[in-house]
Image: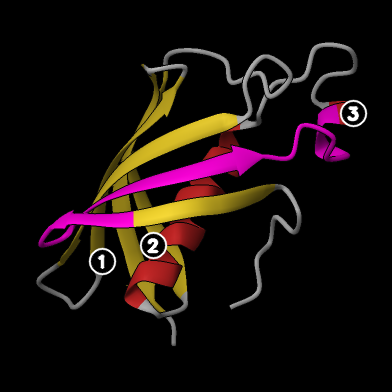
Amino acid sequence: MPTLLADFYQVQRIEALEENAYTISLTLNADHPIFDGHFPHQPVTPGVCVIQIVKEITEKIVDKTLFFQQVKQAKFSSLIDPKVSNVLRIELTIKTGENNDILIQSQIFYQETISVKLSGVLQILA
């Protein structure tokens, strides 16, 4: 599946912990042009990019094309500065909903601190 965030991040490992639970390790490309505008000399990973990363990883795991039908929670508690550390760890739970949609809950860790909590409903497109 093509990625919207080409060259923005690289998945290092996807580990299945138990049924429907995964830990993902990835690295951000600190030299990606998106950081030139967000923000010059003080790069911060855009929240919408973090949401997109979770969607793309979920697509990879379920091997389906998905669309965010609903973001139930998107709580950003700390900035992700790729120049300080470009490593992220994601804890992701994926379940199938009543309408055959995909329910996700995730925590994104940056420097061992929960930086983002994200949950939502993804619709299967293909």
Tag 3 and tag 1, C-beta contact below 8 Å: no
The x, y position of residue 3, in whole percent, is 65, 66
Name the amino acid type tagged 2: Thr
Q: Residue 102 carries which label?
A: 1
Q: Residue 17 carries which label?
A: none
Mark 2, other Cα within 10 Å: few <14 / some 14–19 / many ≥20: many
Q: What element carries label 3?
A: helix
The x, y position of residue 40, in whole percent, is 90, 18
- Location of mark 3 (residue): 36
Tag 2 and tag 3, C-beta contact below 8 Å: no
Q: Kindly give the residue lying farthest to the bottom in the view shown.
A: 126
CA separation, marks 3 and 1? Answer: 34 Å
Look at the image and tell me whether residue 74 can be seen. no
CA separation, marks 2 and 3? Answer: 27 Å
Labels 1, 2: front one:
2
Q: Is residue 18 magenta?
A: yes
Dot 2 or dot 3, earlier in sequence: 3
119 relative to 39, above or below: below
The x, y position of residue 43, in whole percent, is 77, 19
Q: In this orientation, which residue lies closer to the viewer: 16 or 76?
A: 16
On screen, residue 110 versus residue 40, left or right, reads left
Q: What element carries label 1?
A: strand
Tag 1 and tag 2, C-beta contact below 8 Å: yes
- Location of mark 2 (residue): 58
Tell me where residue 61 sits by quadrant.
bottom left
